Image (cartoon, coloured by chain):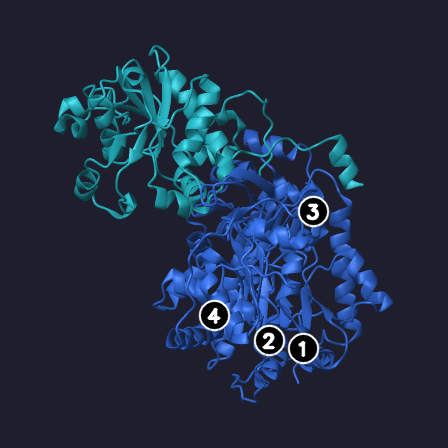
Chain colours: A blue, B cyan
């Protein structure tokens, strides 16, 4: 005897009749989760009896439904969606299908075992067992509320609510992915890799052939990580496989999409982030934020995780599991970062995590090494608008070298204080702007800064990654603040000297005290530079082949 | 190590609308439990307001705004709102109503309760009700945002909540309509529920709760059946306008 759930009873009736099997309806419930729990736990609770008069499908109706189901499965395969998301996908693709037919279609797919389903959130007797099936969040993020949809108390997950509401009474569908194995030539714009890049990209191609599942690529900021991945992506695409490039930040998605579209002119490159217009479409290369990866299941053969160590991805169990779920059974993960956490380096040294290191930038110039300065009562001076000689010296040298200043501060309030300090003390600059996460015209201001219309940008850690401004100088104010850990400091320093033509950029750390993270950051950059020198990359003539 | 440290010395509570930790007392006003950047993007309505619809006015203006003066004074409903419907308020309403982040009902409701206390201190309110949703819409959304707000307000003010009104027919979303269409679309949509005793209702001073006030047509339509039932006084409060 087997138990099944049904969201369209007529389908079951027809399906099992055709198979010649007996079937009895047990009970009826308004909540999907309740039915699921009943089957899981086999507790013979009392339920409402099933009292509906349902007739099986006629033959031509049934054939119609089968056709419909095939069409829908084609679109839905490899996705992990809630009911509401299935509806939005269908609407976005302009499929004329009523909700009732869709329900029948999904039921048929379920009976044919093409889709697995769970309640959005399952909440059993024990609090520890509560889980959101979409994002794997535990009871800390699950809230019991009275639900008007099912008329019962029903749990919802607040962790992934920005994607859509996952609840006990709504089903969560996992559509299995179809295997498409076909050879197709892929057109790539020719690109010139440097010796270092070529070596690493060969290592990655070797890794794709091997047994291991994960690969760590530690490449310094501005090493050309995107270009290095191109041969690997091309290799997989030519085998008809799908690739996902995921990153924790929307800004990085915005920056990557045009570059990859230019590199793969014939391929359909999708950009997925909250509010993107590509949402629900299909493509062979998907560039998504880590949250969007939660909407896929076992479909990608290669997932490239960019900026792995950044918030909110690093040490976020739910997003990590989401990425693993999106990976196909023989799929591989490549982790890209400029600042790997300590334990990963330890794994890589002990051989548990295969890795490659690229200590030099694409143009072959060394990394800018930060200079550390200390200033007593720094923030008090900023607040009272007293002169700060080091800061003035920094600005002088930026003006002398015809650069742009990017000043990082630890918090939003310091942004405002520093902007007013600069307005008072720096006569030469007229366009100084502050940016933080909630600035409404954030993207516009960053664009202005890129176009050199702004001379100085004061910002928080939001811009530590993924921003490339050629003539940039960086000053980290209050580098001793706990938000600036070693990784953040290295990333911020990495904004400087990314262009081949402008190498005068400098990095200064200004703080009240010298902290371990500043010293370690400096040490790591020295180490990388020495490594590059040892390998013979920092020789401008010899570098380009 | 860090986890133990955080257990012993927990971070201050996060801001109601974002994750920034804010140092505040448990019973201080909602405004003080917000982080500075959220505060900056809310535009609370303080100072002189239109005596009818609660629109912020300058000192020199008359006591009733132009829009209200165009209406028949017998349909006026005294309304007060907490903030202007722009900036963070728009976002928060979006999260609460459309994304379904029901937890936000608590800070929003408490904030509205503070406003109620400020404006309606001298009014003998006896009952709180809310703008109803059509059953179909309610089923789709899973909750009635006005009801959640009303429940929080009632807890803070110590007044009962009762579902008095019902929606007779389904109307489509108001948010995509022009002013004129909105004013017409809702006519005679609401009525008093059959389960309510008219004699009891006649003695009540009612406060109607809604989330957003745009033209006020929803609230005026809600007040119409209540007026016909000879309710003593009708007031309303909305979060944003």
Mark 4 burial class by Cα count in 10 Å: few <14, some 14-19, many 20+:
some
Measure how far apart labels 3 and 4 are at the Cα level.
36 Å
Give whichever of discs 1 and 4 has the lower sequence position. 4
Mark 2 burial class by Cα count in 10 Å: few <14, some 14-19, many 20+:
some
Say which chain tag 4 marks.
A
Query: SS at mark 1?
Result: helix
Cβ atoms at labels 1 and 3 below 8 Å apart: no
Measured along the vertical axis of the image, is residue A487 above or below residue B162? Answer: below
Measure how far apart labels 1 and 3 are at the Cα level.
47 Å
Which quarter of the image is occupied by the N terminus of chain A? Answer: bottom right
Give whichever of discs 1 and 3 has the lower sequence position. 3
Residue holding disc 2: A227
Cβ atoms at labels 1 and 2 below 8 Å apart: yes
User: Which residue occupies the foreground of this view, A209 or A484?
Assistant: A209
Whether labels 2 and 3 share one chain:
yes
For this view, does B214 lie left or right of residue A454? left
Say which chain tag 1 marks.
A
Measure how far apart labels 1 and 2 are at the Cα level.
8 Å
Residue A226: x and y in percent read 59, 72
Res. A197 mark = 1
The nearer-to-camera label among 1 and 3 is 3
The nearer-to-camera label among 2 and 4 is 4
User: For the point 52% across and 73% down, which residue is it?
Assistant: A260
Residue B109 sits in which quadrant? Answer: top left
Query: SS at mark 4?
Result: helix
């Amino acid at each position: 005897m087997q138990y099944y759930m049904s969201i369209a009873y007529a389908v079951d009736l027809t399906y099992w009749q055709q198979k010649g099997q007996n079937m009895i309806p047990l009970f009826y419930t308004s909540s999907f989760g309740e039915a699921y729990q009943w089957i899981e736990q086999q507790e013979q609770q009392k339920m409402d009896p099933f009292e509906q008069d349902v007739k099986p499908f006629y033959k031509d109706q049934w054939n119609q439904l089968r056709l419909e189901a095939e069409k829908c499965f084609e679109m839905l395969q490899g996705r992990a969606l809630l009911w509401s998301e299935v509806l939005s996908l269908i609407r976005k693709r302009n499929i004329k299908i009523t909700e009732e037919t869709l329900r029948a279609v999904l039921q048929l797919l379920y009976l044919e075992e093409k889709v697995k389903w769970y309640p959005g959130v399952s909440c059993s007797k024990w609090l520890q067992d509560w889980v959101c099936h979409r994002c794997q969040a535990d009871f800390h993020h699950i809230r019991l509320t009275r639900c008007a949809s099912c008329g019962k108390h029903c749990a919802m997950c607040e962790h992934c609510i920005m994607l859509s509401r996952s609840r006990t009474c709504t089903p969560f569908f996992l559509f299995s992915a179809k295997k498409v194995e076909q050879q197709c030539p892929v057109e790539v714009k020719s690109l010139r890799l440097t010796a270092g890049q070529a070596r690493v990209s060969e290592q990655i191609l070797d890794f794709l052939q091997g047994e291991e599942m994960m690969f760590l690529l530690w490449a310094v900021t501005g090493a050309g990580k995107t270009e290095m991945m191109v041969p690997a992506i091309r290799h997989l695409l030519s085998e008809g496989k799908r690739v996902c490039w995921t990153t924790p930040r929307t800004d990085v998605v915005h920056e990557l999409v045009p570059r990859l579209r230019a590199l793969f002119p014939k391929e359909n490159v999708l950009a997925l982030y909250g509010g993107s217009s590509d949402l629900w479409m299909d493509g062979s290369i998907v560039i998504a934020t880590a949250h969007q990866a939660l909407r896929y299941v076992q479909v990608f053969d290669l997932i490239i995780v960019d900026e792995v160590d950044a918030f909110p991805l690093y040490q976020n169990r739910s997003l990590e599991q989401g990425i693993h779920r999106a990976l196909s059974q023989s799929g591989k993960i490549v982790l890209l970062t400029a600042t790997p956490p300590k334990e990963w380096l330890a794994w890589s040294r002990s051989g548990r995590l295969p890795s490659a290191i690229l200590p030099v930038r694409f143009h072959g110039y060394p990394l800018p090494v930060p200079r550390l300065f200390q200033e007593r009562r720094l923030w008090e001076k900023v607040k009272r608008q007293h002169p700060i000689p080091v800061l003035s010296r920094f600005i002088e040298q930026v003006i002398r070298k015809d650069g742009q200043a990017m000043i990082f501060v630890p918090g939003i309030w310091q942004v405002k204080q520093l902007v007013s300090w600069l307005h008072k003390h720096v006569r030469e600059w007229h366009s100084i702007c502050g940016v933080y996460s909630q600035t409404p015209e954030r993207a516009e201001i960053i664009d202005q800064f890129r176009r050199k219309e702004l001379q100085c940008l004061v910002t928080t850690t939001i811009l530590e990654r993924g921003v490339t401004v050629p003539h940039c100088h960086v000053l980290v104010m209050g580098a001793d603040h706990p938000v600036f850990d070693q990784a953040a400091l290295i990333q911020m320093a990495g904004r400087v000297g990314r262009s081949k033509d402008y190498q005068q950029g400098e990095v200064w750390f200004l703080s009240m005290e010298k902290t371990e993270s500043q010293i370690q950051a400096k040490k790591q950059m020295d180490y990388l530079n020495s490594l590059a020198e040892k390998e013979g990359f920092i020789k401008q003539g010899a570098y380009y082949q | 190590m860090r986890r133990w440290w955080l257990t012993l010395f927990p971070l201050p509570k996060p801001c109601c609308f974002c994750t920034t930790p804010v140092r505040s007392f448990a019973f201080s006003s909602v405004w003080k439990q917000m982080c500075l950047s959220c505060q900056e993007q809310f535009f609370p309505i303080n100072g002189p307001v239109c005596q009818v619809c609660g629109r912020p006015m300058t000192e020199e203006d008359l006591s009733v705004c132009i829009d209200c003066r165009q209406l028949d004074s017998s349909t006026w409903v005294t309304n007060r709102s907490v903030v202007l419907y722009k900036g963070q308020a728009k976002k928060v309403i979006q999260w609460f109503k459309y994304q379904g982040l029901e937890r936000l009902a608590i800070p929003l409701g408490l904030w509205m309760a503070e406003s109620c206390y400020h404006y309606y201190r001298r009014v003998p309110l006896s009952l709180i009700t809310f703008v109803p949703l059509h059953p179909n819409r309610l089923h789709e959304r899973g909750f009635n945002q006005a009801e959640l707000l009303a429940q929080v307000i009632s807890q803070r003010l110590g007044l009962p909540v009762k579902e008095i009104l019902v929606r007779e027919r389904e109307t489509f979303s108001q948010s995509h309509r022009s002013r004129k269409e909105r004013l017409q679309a809702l006519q005679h949509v609401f009525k008093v529920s059959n389960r309510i005793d008219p004699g009891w209702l006649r003695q009540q001073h009612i406060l109607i709760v809604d989330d957003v006030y745009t033209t006020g047509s929803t609230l005026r339509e809600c007040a119409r059946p209540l007026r016909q039932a000879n309710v003593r006084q009708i007031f309303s409060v909305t979060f944003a306008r």
